[in-house]
Amino acid sequence: MGSARGSVAQFLPWPLCRRILGSATLALLPLLTGAAVAQAASLTQEAGSDNVSIWPVLLPLLTASVGIERAIEVFWNYVDWIILNFRGGQPAQLKSPQYLQFKSGTSLVLGIVIGILVSNFTGMRLLEYLRPLAPAFLDNVPVLWDVVLTGVIIGSGSKPAHDILGIITQFKNFLANSAIRQREAASAALADGVLKLAQSDAQAMIEVPGVGPARLAAPAGSRGLDEEDAGEAGPEVSPTERYIAILHNRTSM
């Protein structure tokens, strides 16, 4: 365990990560100092109806979570690219449990920080929207708590959004791989049939002295079928080519 952790520490950009976390902490300071201003601005917003539906507030939260998840994914793609190209990391090291745990924890922290910032600057307030449902309880909730809670929900939702997008991607890859395997199986069956037909065609040939290879006469029962196939595929084609043409005509229908 110690050697694996040491190998991860050799290529993990710890100074960069510390700067990221420090910048995220500094980004929250204006939010904390501006809580009074946000509270004064929120007092001017009133609920227009007593019938409150949860979907108008959930859809923006879900959209913000998906957007944050995509932004964090792009960020880690650049970090992995820097590790592989400038710090001498190996692809196997990027899949180590220690590095994956670090990415998961850092992604959660970054998602929450970005979610709080998005909630503050876009005016998303979950508790304020739900205030008509429980006015006696939610009227006394500070605006800062509402902003932080909404941001935590947005940032924490980026992980389930990432998992859902991963499941969709895996399902799409499964369908693509299944189609490829079906085409490969059909190609293998076609090649096997052509090979067997070519072998049987070769066995039906005999070497005639002074003439060369000559085909044996077909039985009377199968002669009519051969003539019918020959009329469909053309007069000057081999049985192998007729077999390929028949398979092509049947599979293209």
Image (cartoon, helix red, strand yellow):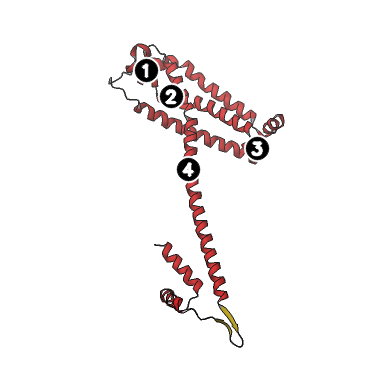
Amino acid type of the residue tagged 4 in the rendering: Phe
Residue under numbered circle 3: 93
Query: Which quadrant holds the C terminus?
Result: bottom left
Residue under numbered circle 4: 171
Residue under numbered circle 1: 42
Q: Position of residue 41 (x, y in %)?
A: 37, 17
Residue at point 45% right, 65% down?
247
Mark 1 vs mark 4, foreground winner is 4
Q: Position of residue 35 (x, y in %)?
A: 44, 16
Name the one closer to the observer, 248 or 113.
Answer: 248
Label pair 2/1, CB-CB below 8 angstroms: no
Q: Count neighbours of disc 4 (C-alpha within 10 A) and say few if under 14, some if 14 to 19, many if 20 or more.
A: few
Residue at point 35% right, 25% down?
54
Name the one closer to the observer, 212 or 248.
Answer: 212
Amino acid type of the residue tagged 1 in the rendering: Ser
Q: How much space separates mark 3 and mark 2, taking CA atoms?
A: 36 Å
